[in-house]
């Protein structure tokens, strides 16, 4: 019966199974994230994030979507590298809201979206537009998109005042049905930003005021007819004008069981090179930490001691468990553990002298349709 | 430039894969929720936000979304 329902749903979709029709039911999702990252002898950032997402189809050709998230952030962040004594403690709240409207056509869809994210020292606003076009046989869908974000930065330490950043991103891609059990996607994105990229709360952090980012995302989903399981694989290549090149591999195995249970183990592997202006934790013999060897107060060179710009590798293992309650409600729990190490970098040597970095997160959620 | 060309050729090749076209009545498995590239919007947002706050790379799966302090 369930198989018949799925087949009928597929036949009813004139477009690529995933794209050109509004869903026939409204969806409400509520999720709560608890996130903690740490290094030896220092619990760093703790985030608690309740979030809501609602999507409502209208007249069969429109979809209205809105989401709200609130991040309650507390903890400590090192002012340079992983120095515990230099960590600054803080507590703040970020509130994000965004909304989107999608119009569906027989072989196309257009989505317009806008949003705002606000912290006491950082406000970001964005608008974006995306469109998809399906081929006559509905096995290929072309995707294009563009977005603009304007950020306003006013740090509490008055390092800068009323700084700004403007980011434009462009995307093009294609989704292709390869076989009755295989679908693939390639997305190319280009991001161009101008403005304040430095971190006002870190010592010796000056970054270029312009940045270019390019990424290629390849995704492949495969369904196993015998077990009913699905493997979901992706690879992202990323490069930017700061000199950071990265590779990200993600694999998920979605395995349904009887009585509405689904278990999804996942593994994510990540590796990046260092930004060209990142310096290792080796300090000037005259000035000491955090000043790099040969530091000059007047040369105006770009420099950063931010661990995120170092060369390293990282791995995340995750497990998600979902349970259907009735026909239209699902509850889920997801656990993830993340570790980052300099020596785990692939395709080169990692940065030395940094403390190991770890994070763990727990998500619980409920989704209902009507 | 060469890199962009290679990527462009790869995307065109992907779109034109010379495989037997899948017929509408063969798409039952493709219609399953797990086969979608966007299964859980909030989970995807959490992932993008937490990874972009601790790694040098970000994005790649779409446009829009804005920035954050994430210091």
Image (cartoon, coloured by chain):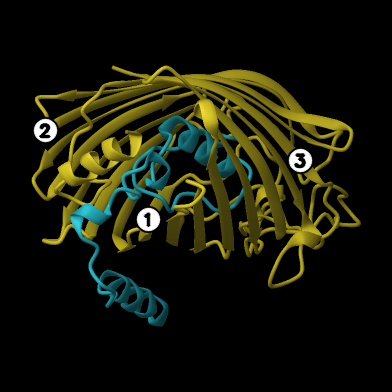
Chain colours: A yellow, B cyan
Q: Select label 3 or label 1 by which is in front.
A: 3
- Extreme-front residue of the structure: A1
- First in sequence: mark 2 or mark 1? 2
What is the CA distance from the residue labelled 3 to the residue labelled 2?
45 Å
Which quadrant of the view contains residue A202?
top right
Residue at point 61%, 57% (across, down): A302
Residue at point 29%, 45% (across, down): A147
Chain letter of mark 2 equals A
Question: From what the image shows, is residue A266 above or below residue B9?
Answer: above
Q: Select label 2 or label 1 by which is in front.
A: 2
Chain letter of mark 3 equals A
Chain letter of mark 1 equals A
B21 vs A44, nearest the viewer: B21
Which percent across, then down, holds residue A106?
8, 46
Residue bearing the label numbered 1:
A192
Question: From what the image shows, is residue A195 above or below residue A40?
Answer: below
- First in sequence: mark 3 or mark 2? 2
Q: Secondary structure at mark 1?
A: strand
Label 2 neighbourhood size at 10 Å, few (<14), some (14-19), many (20+)?
Answer: some
Residue bearing the label numbered 3:
A358
Q: Secondary structure at mark 3?
A: strand
Is residue A214 shown to the viewer in this render?
A: no
Which percent across, then down, holds residue A229?
50, 47
Mark drawn on residue A127: none
Label 3 neighbourhood size at 10 Å, few (<14), some (14-19), many (20+)?
Answer: many
Query: If the image is split into quadrants, where does the C terminus of chain A sit?
Result: top left
Label 1 neighbourhood size at 10 Å, few (<14), some (14-19), many (20+)?
Answer: some
Residue bearing the label numbered 2:
A61
Which percent across, then down, holds residue A40?
87, 38
Are discs 3 and 1 located on one and the same chain?
yes
Left or right of residue A359, residue B44 in this image: left
Left or right of residue A352, residue A173 in this image: left
């Amino acid at each position: 019966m369930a198989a018949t329902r799925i087949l009928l749903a597929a036949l009813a979709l004139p477009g690529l199974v995933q794209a050109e029709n509004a869903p026939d039911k409204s969806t409400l999702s509520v999720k709560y994230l608890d996130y903690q990252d740490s290094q030896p002898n220092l619990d760093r950032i703790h985030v608690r994030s309740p979030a809501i997402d609602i999507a409502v189809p209208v007249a069969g050709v429109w979809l209205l979507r809105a989401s709200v998230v609130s991040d309650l952030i507390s903890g400590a962040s090192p002012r340079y590298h992983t120095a515990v004594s230099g960590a600054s403690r803080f507590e703040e709240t970020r509130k994000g809201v965004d909304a989107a409207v999608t119009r569906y056509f027989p072989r196309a869809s257009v989505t317009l979206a806008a949003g705002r994210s606000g912290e006491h020292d950082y406000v970001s606003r964005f608008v974006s537009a995306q469109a998809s076009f399906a081929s006559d046989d509905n096995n290929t869908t072309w995707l294009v998109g563009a977005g603009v974000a304007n950020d306003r930065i006013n740090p509490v330490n008055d390092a800068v005042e009323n700084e700004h950043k403007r980011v434009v991103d462009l995307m093009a891609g294609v989704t292709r049905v390869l076989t009755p059990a295989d679908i693939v996607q390639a997305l190319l994105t280009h991001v161009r930003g101008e403005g304040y990229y430095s971190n006002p709360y870190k010592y010796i952090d000056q970054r270029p005021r312009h940045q270019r980012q390019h990424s290629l995302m390849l995704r492949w989903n495969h369904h196993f007819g015998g077990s009913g399981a699905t493997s979901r694989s992706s690879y992202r290549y990323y490069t930017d004008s700061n000199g950071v090149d990265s590779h990200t591999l993600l694999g998920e195995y979605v395995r349904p069981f009887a009585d509405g249970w689904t278990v999804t183990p996942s593994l994510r592997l990540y590796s990046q090179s260092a930004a060209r202006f990142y310096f290792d934790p080796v300090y000037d013999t005259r000035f000491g930490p955090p000043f790099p060897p040969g530091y000059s107060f007047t040369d105006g060179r770009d420099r950063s001691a931010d661990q995120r710009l170092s060369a390293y590798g990282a791995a995340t293992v995750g497990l998600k468990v979902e349970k259907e309650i009735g026909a239209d409600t699902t509850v889920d729990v997801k656990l993830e553990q993340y570790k980052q190490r300099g020596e785990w970098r692939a395709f080169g040597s990692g940065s030395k002298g940094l403390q190991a970095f770890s994070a763990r997160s727990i998500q619980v959620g409920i989704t209902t349709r009507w | 430039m060469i890199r962009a060309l290679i990527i462009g050729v790869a995307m065109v090749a992907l779109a034109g894969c010379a495989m037997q076209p899948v017929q509408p009545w063969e798409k039952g498995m493709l219609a399953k929720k797990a086969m979608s590239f966007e299964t859980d919007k909030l989970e995807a947002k959490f992932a993008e936000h937490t990874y972009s706050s601790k790694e040098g790379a970000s994005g790649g799966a779409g446009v829009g979304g804005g920035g954050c302090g994430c210091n």
